C-alpha cells in the first residue's frame, strides 16, 4: 500500500518535471547566446554624489525617462502617460504637450525652434512641434522595424542620431533582452534631407542614451549591459 503511494507520487513528480521541461523547451521566449555580461571594470572610483540629489516632480511625473534643460532653464521630460511635461523657472510643473501612447522615452531639442524629438518605444522617432503637431520621422531602418526607439540627439546640420535598444524585444518585454544577452541594439541615423534611416552601429547591448560633444566629431552611445 505504502509502496503503491510512493510509486504514484514518484510518477507524478516525474510527469510534472517532464511537462515543465517540454513547456520551457517549446515556449521559452528567449534564446540566450554566450556567457552573461562581465562586471563593469572599476574605471571610475566609487562616490556617493547621488545621495545628495533632489527629486524633481516626485509623485507627479509617471516614470520620466529622459530630460533636457533649454537655454532658459526650463526642464522637459516625457512621461508614461503620454505627456511631455515642463518645469518652469519657478519650479512649477505643467503638462506641456500631449503626444499619447505609453512608451515615451528620450527627449531632445530639435532645430532650436522649440520643436522636440521624442522617442516612442512603440512607434519610433517622433518630432513634436511647438504648436503640438506630432510627426513620425522613422519607424524602420534598413528595412527592419524600429522596435525600441530609446534616445535621440540632433546635430547642427539636422542629422538625428538615435538608439534602438533591441531588435528582438519591445518595450513590454525589455527584461527578456537582459535575460537573453544577445546584444541586438542599434545606433541609427536619420537624414532630414532624404528622410532615410541608416544603421550606424549594430550589435549593441541594449543601446540607450546618445550624445554629441560640442565639436560633433563623434557620437556617444550608452550600452545598458555588456
Ligand atoms: C510659475 O511661472 C509660470 C510661468 O511664468 C506661471 O504661469 C505660474 O503661475 C507660476 N507658478 C507659480 C506657482 O508661481
Image (cartoon, rainbow, N blue to C red):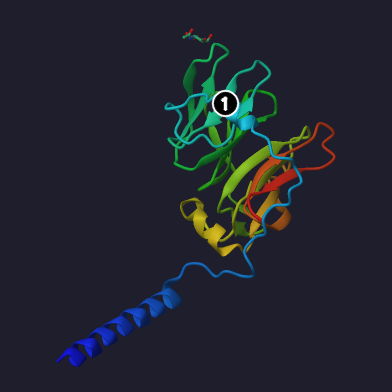
Residue 138 visible in the snapshot: no
Label 1 SS? strand
Dot 1 surroundings within 10 Å: few (below 14), some, or many (20 or more)?
A: many
Question: Which residue occupies the extreme left position in the image?
Answer: 1
- Quadrant position of residue 112: top right
- Quadrant position of residue 22: bottom left
Q: Is residue 93 above or below residue 220?
A: above
Q: Nearer the viewer, residue 192 or 152?
A: 152
Q: In this rendering, would 136 be left or right of 110?
A: left
Q: Nearer the viewer, residue 24 or 147?
A: 24
* Quarter occupied by the N terminus: bottom left
Q: In this rendering, would 195 be left or right of 157?
A: left
Residue at (24% x, 90% y) in the render: 7
**Relative image position of residue 102 (x, y in whole percent):** 44, 41
Question: Which residue occupies the extreme front position in the image?
Answer: 2
Residue 159 visible in the snapshot: yes
Residue at (42% x, 72% y) in the render: 27
Q: Is residue 25 above or below residue 134?
A: below
Residue at (60% x, 19% y) in the render: 74
Which residue position is annotated with label 1? 76
Q: Is residue 169 above or below residue 118?
A: below
**Relative image position of residue 109 (x, y in whole percent):** 65, 29
* Quarter occupied by the C terminus: bottom right
Q: In this rendering, would 82 be left or right of 207?
A: left
- Quadrant position of residue 69: top right
Q: Nearer the viewer, residue 38 or 108?
A: 38
Amino acid at each position: 500500500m505504502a509502496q503503491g503511494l510512493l510509486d504514484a507520487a514518484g510518477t507524478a513528480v516525474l510527469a510534472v518535471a517532464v511537462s515543465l521541461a517540454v513547456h520551457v523547451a517549446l515556449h521559452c521566449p528567449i534564446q540566450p547566446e554566450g556567457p552573461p555580461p562581465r562586471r563593469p571594470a572599476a574605471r571610475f572610483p566609487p562616490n556617493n554624489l547621488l545621495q545628495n540629489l533632489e527629486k524633481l516632480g516626485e509623485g507627479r511625473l509617471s516614470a520620466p525617462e529622459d530630460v533636457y534643460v533649454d537655454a532658459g532653464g526650463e526642464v522637459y521630460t516625457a512621461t508614461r502617460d503620454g505627456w511631455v511635461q515642463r518645469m518652469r523657472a519657478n519650479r512649477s510643473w505643467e503638462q506641456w504637450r500631449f503626444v499619447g501612447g505609453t512608451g515615451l522615452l528620450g527627449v531632445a531639442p530639435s532645430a532650436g525652434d522649440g520643436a522636440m524629438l521624442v522617442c516612442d518605444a512603440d512607434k519610433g522617432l517622433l518630432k513634436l512641434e511647438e504648436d503640438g503637431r506630432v510627426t513620425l520621422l522613422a519607424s524602420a531602418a534598413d528595412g527592419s522595424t524600429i522596435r525600441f526607439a530609446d534616445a535621440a540627439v540632433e546635430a547642427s546640420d539636422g542629422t538625428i542620431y538615435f538608439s534602438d535598444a533591441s531588435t528582438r524585444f519591445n518595450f513590454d518585454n525589455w527584461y527578456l533582452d537582459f535575460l537573453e544577452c544577445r546584444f541586438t541594439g542599434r545606433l541609427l541615423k536619420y537624414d532630414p534631407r532624404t528622410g532615410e534611416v541608416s544603421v550606424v552601429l549594430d550589435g549593441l547591448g541594449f543601446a540607450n542614451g546618445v550624445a554629441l560633444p560640442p565639436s560633433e566629431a563623434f557620437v556617444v552611445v550608452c550600452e545598458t549591459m555588456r
